[in-house]
Amino acid sequence: MEKDSEIVGFMGINGTKLEMLFIAPEQRGKGIGKTLLQHGIAELGVNSLTVNEQNPQAVGFYQHMGFQTVERHELDEQGNPYPILIMKK
């Protein structure tokens, strides 16, 4: 997503899984993430994601967007000790 010809946010999707969603720190809280995720859900069928449990802001955002935790793992997808949550819509 661009604002004044500058990239302020982007997402990566694999099938129906949201792989990443990044918003520039100074642009957070302006609805950019919500707009991107709504597009992913409506147009691309996004219905699942993983999120670091230690990122409560992201977890809360995804819950607000209708995702629920269905699994929890002690290690991230690379085997590092960062607990992750599997969330589905």
Image (cartoon, helix red, strand yellow):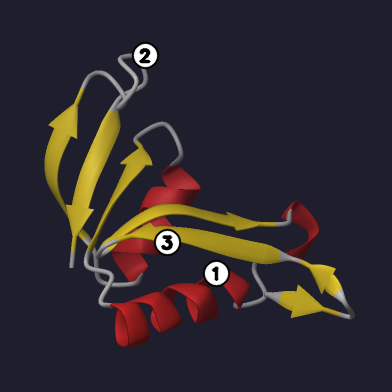
Task: Name the residue at 22% across, 67% down.
Answer: 47
Q: Relative to 74, does residue 40 appear above or below in the rendering?
A: below
Image side of residue 67 versus residue 25, left or right: left
Q: Position of residue 80 (x, y in %)?
A: 36, 14
* Secondary structure type for disc 3: helix
* Secondary structure type for disc 1: helix
Task: Name the residue at 32% across, 87% down.
Answer: 42
Q: Which residue is mark 2?
A: 80
Q: Name the one closer to the observer, 68 or 88.
A: 88
Q: Which residue is mark 3?
A: 61
Q: Are marks 2 and 3 in contact (CB under 8 Å)?
A: no
Q: Relative to 6, does residue 25 appear above or below in the rendering?
A: above
Task: Name the amino acid type tagged 2.
Answer: Asn
Marks 3/1: CA–CA distance = 9 Å
> Between tags 3 and 1, which lies in front?
1
Task: Name the amino acid type tagged 1.
Answer: Gly
- Looking at the rendering, which quadrant does residue 13 occupy? bottom left
Marks 1/2: CA–CA distance = 26 Å
**Picture disc at residue 33:** 1
First along the sequence among labels 1 and 2: 1
Task: Name the residue at 37% across, 50% down.
Answer: 59
Q: Name the one closer to the observer, 4 or 73.
A: 4
Position of the N terminus by quadrant:
bottom right
First along the sequence among labels 3 and 1: 1
**Furthest residue in direction bottom, as rendered:** 42
Position of the C terminus by quadrant:
bottom left
Marks 2/3: CA–CA distance = 24 Å
> Between tags 1 and 2, which lies in front?
2
Q: Position of residue 73 (x, y in %)?
A: 18, 26
Q: Are marks 3 and 1 in contact (CB under 8 Å)?
A: yes
Q: Name the one closer to the observer, 62 or 3.
A: 3
- Looking at the rendering, which quadrant does residue 53 occupy? top left
